[in-house]
Amino acid sequence: MPSVASEIALNRLRLKVCSEENNCTITLKEVGEGNETKVVYELKVEKQSKILWLFKKQMQVNVQVDAKNGDIIKIERPWWAFLAS
């Protein structure tokens, strides 16, 4: 279910809601190649973060959640995400 998949991803990203206000979108996609395709929900969200706890910066985060069981397949963050809070 999309609501369960999005709830799992939002908990992992420490967000309360996915809405237009925080530039969050949920789309249903098919990923993979050949016989190895999966149906996933892809969440794209812009999070407000601070680099080195000083400088404000928007961070684009992409999360892929398996549509069948709700497992998180992949999380993509910028390379500098380990420096951000």
Image (cartoon, rainbow, N blue to C red):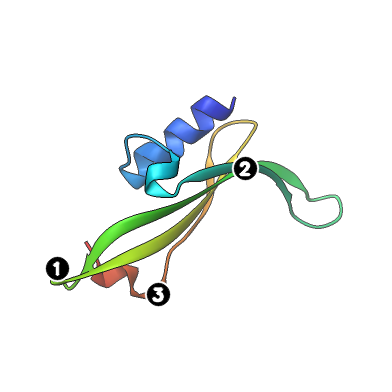
Mark 2 belongs to which amino acid?
Thr
Mark 3 belongs to which amino acid?
Trp
Query: Callout 3: 10 Å neighbours few (<14), some, many (20+)?
Result: few
Q: Nearer the viewer, residue 9 or 51?
A: 51
Q: Which residue is mark 3?
A: 79
Q: Is residue 54 left or right of residue 28?
A: left
Q: Is residue 8 above or below residue 42?
A: above
Upstream in sequence: badge 3 or badge 2: 2
Q: Which residue is mark 1?
A: 53
Q: Residue at x 36, y 46 (%)?
A: 13
Q: CA distance from mark 2 to mark 1?
A: 32 Å
Q: Position of residue 25 (x, y in %)?
A: 52, 45
Q: CA distance from mark 3 to mark 1?
A: 16 Å
Q: Is residue 64 above or below residue 79?
A: above
Query: Callout 1: 10 Å neighbours few (<14), some, many (20+)?
Result: few
Q: Tell me the quadrant of the picture where the N terminus can be found.
A: top right
Mark 1 belongs to which amino acid?
Trp
- Label 3 close to label 1 by CB (< 8 Å): no
Upstream in sequence: badge 2 or badge 1: 2
Q: Nearer the viewer, residue 24 or 37?
A: 24
Camera-nearest label, 3 or 1: 1
Query: Callout 2: 10 Å neighbours few (<14), some, many (20+)?
Result: few
Q: Position of residue 71 (x, y in %)?
A: 53, 39
Q: Position of residue 9 (x, y in %)?
A: 44, 40
